[in-house]
Structures are given as C-alpha cells and as structure tokens.
Image (tube, rainbow, N blue to C red):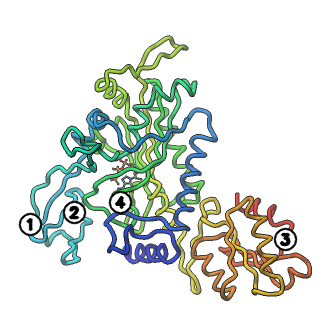
Amino acid sequence: MASDAMDKIASLCKRRGFVFQSSEIYGGINACWDYGPAGVELKRNVKDLWWRALTQLRDDIEGLDSAILMHPKVWHASGHVESFTDPMVDCRMCKARFRADQLDEAVCPTTGRPVLPQCAPHLTEPRAFNLMFKTFMGPVEEASAVVYLRPETAQGIYVNFQNVLGPSRQKVPFGIAQIGKAFRNEISPGNFIFRSREFEQMEMQFFVPPGDASSWFDYWKGQRMEWYREIGIDPGRLRFHEHGPDELAHYAKQAVDIEYEFPFGWKELEGIHNRSDFDLRRHIEHSGKDLSYFDQESNQHFVPHIIETSAGADRTVLTLLVEAYAEEEERTVLRFHPKVAPVKVAVFPLVKRDGMPERARAITTDLRRRFRVFYDEKGAVGRRYRRQDEIGTPFCVTVDSQTLIDDTVTVRERDSMAQTRVSSEGLVAYFRDRLA
Ligand code: ATP
C-alpha cells in the first residue's frame, strides 16, 4: 500500500515536472533529486513562507546565508567528526549495507524481501559510519586539506553569532535563520525525497538567557506546529514526538520532533531542540574567542542557550504532495493550499481564433503582475483543466465567445470544479480574496 502510494506520487512528479532523478540519462545517481518547473516553484513557496514567518513578520530574528564549506575545526568543535555517525551493518552474502537501527524497515536489494528475518544470519556486527562527505580544498589531496560538505546549516549560524549581533543591534533573546543545502552520506536513503544525500534545511537558532530556555522551547514548539497547519497540512496527521532521555542527541537537553503521517508511517518533519549552551561553549573552547554576551539590563555576562528549530524543505515538499494527492473517478488532483500551489491561475482561450488568444494573453499579462499565471492554448480545454489539476492550480480562467460580447470569463475552481462567470475587470480582486 505504502509503496504503491509513493510510486504514484513519484510518477506524477516526473510526469508533471515536479521532481526528477538526478542525472537520469546516465541511469541516475542514488538519493539525489532535481526539481523541475513545478517543483522548483513549490519548494520556493515553502522556503518563502518559512522565511517570511521567521524573519519578515518578526523583529527578533535575522537572516544569514553562510558558506557550505567551513573551517574543518568547526566540525571537530561541533562533535560531528567524532560522533555524527549511524550504526551500519553489512550483509556478507550480497554486500548490501543497512542502518542497524532501521533493520525492521530494510529490504534486501537482491531478493526484494524484508531483510529480517531472512538475512539476519549473514549480517555483520554494527559499526559506526560517519555521515559527512569529505573533499579536499586546494590542489593537494592530503590530510591537512580535508574539508567537509556541511551536514547541517546550524554551525554557520553559531560561528556568526557575534557577527550578526553587532550590526543587527539585536539583544538576547533573538534568533538567526538560514536556508541552505546540507549533505549527508546516508546509509539507507529512500522514500523518494524523504531521505536524500543532498537536501535543503530551514534552520533557526534562537539565543536566550540560560534561565529562559525551557519556556522558549515550549513557545517554539507551538509556533512551528502552527506553521504547518497554516500551509495546509491536516492537524490530524501531525503530532509531537518527545524524545526520552535515551533518545536525546549529545547536544540536546530537551528535544521534540514534529512528525507527519506519511504513507510509510509517522516520520520526522522537523526537530526542535533545547541545545543549552553546548554549541557556543564548544566554539569558545575550540576557537579561543569570547562568544559570551553582556546583558545591560541585568548587568550580567553569560553564554546564551540555544533553542533550535530545524526543518527540511524537501520533507515539507513531500508532505505537501502526500497531503494534496487525491484520485477521483475521472481525474488525479493535487489539492494544494493556494499559498503553496506552484501556479495560482491558468488562463486559456477556448479556441485559437476569433481574437480569444489575444484577449486571454491580455488577461494573463494583467494577472501576472500579482500572481504566478500559466497561459495555455494547446489542445482540448478539458485536457488543459486536467493538466492544471495535476499540478494543483487552484483556478482556471477560460476566455470564450461570451467574453467577446460582455467581457466576462469562466472561472473554474479546482476542488469543486464549479464554474462561475466573472467580469474580467474584477479578476484581480476575485483572486486576491481567494488566494490569500
Ligand atoms: P532522521 O532521524 O530522519 O535522520 P535527523 O534527526 O538526523 O533526521 P536532523 O539532524 O534533526 O534530522 O535534521 C533536521 C531536519 O532536516 C529533519 O527533520 C529533516 O526534515 C531534514 N533532514 C535531515 N536529514 C535529511 C535527509 N537525509 N534528507 C532530507 N531531509 C533531511
């Protein structure tokens, strides 16, 4: 069932230009994905909505775009060189590798059957596998030239804490937000874009006085859950998963995941962590720089504690696709919330004559100043509607012979398929109300 649902979504994504396998003409490269015309718009909307909610609608969070390649000492200080590992087991028979903590879900690539229990006798003892990609900086490939592709965007924020604090004139509590690529050499990637080796994170680190960390943790839990609801995800398929003491990462004092009910089970969408003063202390120790903060009101020096909200842009895209996907008797439709839909309005001339294309083009130009609009004049109008349904366009506008008489158009709504006549002059106002 689960793989059937995911196969259907992946096939729609390919057919309608959302997501393609990377380097497909060469047979593809595992766990890397390319976003096509519809996918890039969908993902951009996700990132823009996150950026707007976290930075533009508040005055206590600043933006940052730090480099992917950082000084290797960063990853020693953060603990990643030492402990950013997953336990891995090898199959002595077919040489496949699996995550030891995910054997229950693993499938043998040779037989196509679950790894457990059949392959159990052939599996090695688990050993730690570091997930960071390594490369060399400069022309010489030697140990001193090793650099890492960042496995998370957070460290770029910590090392820039003082740089941002000064020019932004912020005071603790305040946050720094960043969106960017991260790379992990995952042992068992899969479930389409859910777990890949190159992906995008949307991370925000909120610096707080030591005594306030727990209450800010609760605040950010609430804010982030609300954001997923606002972008159209059913609250019934979202839940918190609190980490027990045995699940906590080495840096975390409190941790909670926001999980979504995917066809393959409840899985993490975002992690919210109370990281205490772990990160800034480690960078103070390793860099020798003072990253403490002087609070003028209380006249105190302290190392800020950090509440982190760490979300995946690609996982959010997958969630939106799963949430929106619906098969009806005569059509497949993506019922995206208008906020995230890649195209907001499609405009069609009913036929390619009698001045209809010209009128439809003029309407397109007018609407384009406010919304993302797609113009299409090819093929039967029914087919054009179906195509828009499959990319989740909330409204289609059709210019027909009546338009040439009274300047009204047909507006067809995606979910109900109801058709209404609207004066073309009033279209901007009509959509402004409905696309908010
Ligand atoms: P998981 O347990 O699924 O491996 P994680 O706990 O390692 O995730 P974090 O390090 O907390 O994940 O990363 C924060 C977010 O980044 C995750 O909630 C997820 O949305 C995203 N993310 C992490 N790894 C991947 C990946 N390999 N592919 C796509 N998104 C990812």
For the residues marked 1 and 3, what is the alpha-carbon distance in whole angstroms?
A: 68 Å
Q: Which residue is most to the front?
A: 139
Percent position (x, y) of residue 88? 18, 56
Label located before the other in sequence (1 or 4): 1
Classify mark 2 as within 8 Å of ligand 1 or not, answering yes or no: no
Q: Is residue 225 left or right of residue 397?
A: left
Helix, strand or loop at mark 1? loop
Q: Quadrant of residue 71?
A: top left
Residue 133 visible to the viewer: yes
* Pointer 1 or 3: first along the chain: 1
Residue hosting label 1: 92
Label 3 SS: helix
Confirm or reject: label 4 Cβ below 8 Å from ligand 1: yes
N-term-proximal mark, 3 vs 4:
4
Q: Secondary structure at mark 2?
A: helix
- Residue type beneath disc 2: Leu
Residue hosting label 4: 196
Name which residue lies at 86% across and 67% down. Answer: 425
